[in-house]
Image (cartoon, coloured by chain):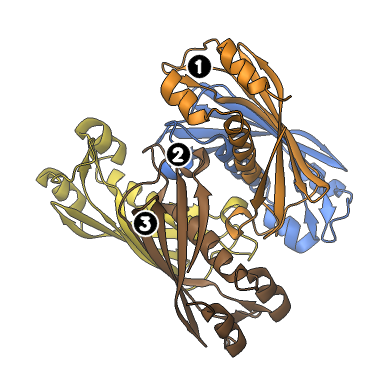
Chain colours: A brown, B yellow, C blue, D orange
């Protein structure tokens, strides 16, 4: 599990006075990127050095409460599953102790040609560190 | 069922060369807004005249194929459910006949104070027109 | 001069109740893309077939009045300058007859290697059509 | 002068492989917000407690070089001018020592009714701290 802080800017919000529902997917991205980085890898290096991509094939989010301008949010990311053909990250967005949004993204490893490929065992182990 | 066309701009895409996964939620919004408008109502008037909001409480999307810069997409929106405390819209994003993304959003009617309220029968009937 | 209509969505606005200032640059992009397309060319084809890019090197915008949710805006685009090493597009964003935002973008032609290159006379002439 | 670090995410970039030109305006916002906060004030409190808004009336940016995915950028913000009816912030976006983008935003103080108002001397002095 990893946590990153994020402060909501004007550009994240909408005229309803709260964060636009689509922008939480940016927070999910920040969360999983930092999750990977803190295990000594970067998503960028997975792409560039290994020619491996992990596109999102599915996303789900439940909005319980709203983030507002200037709120400091905690993006909490966990690894829910890591197998050779599927990776699932789980997210909770919190303000202090309040759960605002929860969700997950499902990823499938593909190569540069866009073909589904096998996630190397070594990367699976790195992702699973400290679960 | 309603269809709207949308042309992908540079600002929608990411460095993977395709539309950023979070930006499809903008397309979902465009789809449901037009769905409502074509039944003679506007989401804006529901908000302003009736003090009724329909925030997204849940979203789900499956990404099957990628939209690219300058693609003309079809946003197809259907009403999956409309009850006094729950509205569900379904979406498919197509390029020509190819299904790129499918998803749904779940909405709960609230009043200006943020309290869950009842969706008037009249609005339910308008939403159900032509299903 | 070319005009495109654009309807403001929730995702364009911010908690100030109006369109986020950065999002007008998306409208500028829509404007210049359509300006080019209506002269029988596409920006995409300039890029793909000629290996020519026209990145923005400078932008300026003046915000006079605010676009709001569900407004239908007119994006009016003009060509202010087209020379071998410089292209300038001008924009006005209107709601009915009211000027909301005006601005311009300056572009410099580069090749795929990122080197400044010459804009072919033929493209200059196409851009200047109907000025 | 104040500096904030910002890491570029996928959602900031476009299919040209670099940060979308409109998204630098988000960075400008982050820069000026932190500039104000580090002087013991928040933009939010100026709005909520004093009923004073500082909307952007003009923006200018020059793009010299491109930010890429996963770059750590420095947003450097300075106060260029602070008078009773005008505030100007200057920005430079750097990657290490390289200047990528420079720009400024001009702001005019208005009240909740949208009328131009006078920026209190006290706020001007706070903004000018440490120039």
- Chain bearing tag 1 is D
**Residue topped by disc 3:** A101
Compare residues B79 and A20 and report the one nearer the observer.
A20
Q: Quadrant of residue B105?
A: bottom left
Q: Quadrant of residue C85?
A: top right
- Chain containing mark 2: A
Residue identifier under label 2: A69
Q: How far, Cα to Cα, is label 1 from label 3?
A: 34 Å
Q: Is residue B120 left or right of residue B94?
A: left
Instruction: Label 1, secondary structure: give it.
Output: strand
Q: Nearer the viewer, residue C101 or A95?
A: A95
Q: Nearer the viewer, residue B120 or B79?
A: B120
Residue C70 appears in which quarter of the rendering? top left
Which part of the image, by quadrant, shows the N terminus of chain C?
A: top right
Q: Is residue A25 visible?
A: no
Q: Is residue B103 left or right of residue D80?
A: left
Describe the element under mark 2 as helix, strand or loop: loop
Query: What residue lies at 74% left-to-right and 62% top-to-bottom?
Result: C48
Q: Which residue is the site of mark 1?
A: D110
The picture places residue C115, in percent across and down from the top left corner, at 88, 54
Q: Is residue A119 above or below residue D4?
A: below
Q: Disc 3 versus disc 2: distance between alpha carbons?
A: 16 Å
Q: Secondary structure at mark 3?
A: strand
Q: Mark 3 packing: few (<14 Cα in 10 Å), some, or many (20+)?
A: many
């Amino acid at each position: 599990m990893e946590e990153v802080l994020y402060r909501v800017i004007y550009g994240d919000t909408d005229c309803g006075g709260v964060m636009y529902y689509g922008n939480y997917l940016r927070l999910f991205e920040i969360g999983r990127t930092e999750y990977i980085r803190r295990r000594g890898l970067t998503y960028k290096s997975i792409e560039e050095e290994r020619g491996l991509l992990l596109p999102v094939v599915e996303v789900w989010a439940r909005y319980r409460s709203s983030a507002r301008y200037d709120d400091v949010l905690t993006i909490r990311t966990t690894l829910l599953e890591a197998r050779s053909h599927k990776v699932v990250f789980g997210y909770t967005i919190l303000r202090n102790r309040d759960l605002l949004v929860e969700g997950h993204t499902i990823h499938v490893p593909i190569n540069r040609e866009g073909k589904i490929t096998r996630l190397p065992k070594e990367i699976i182990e790195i992702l699973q560190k400290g679960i």
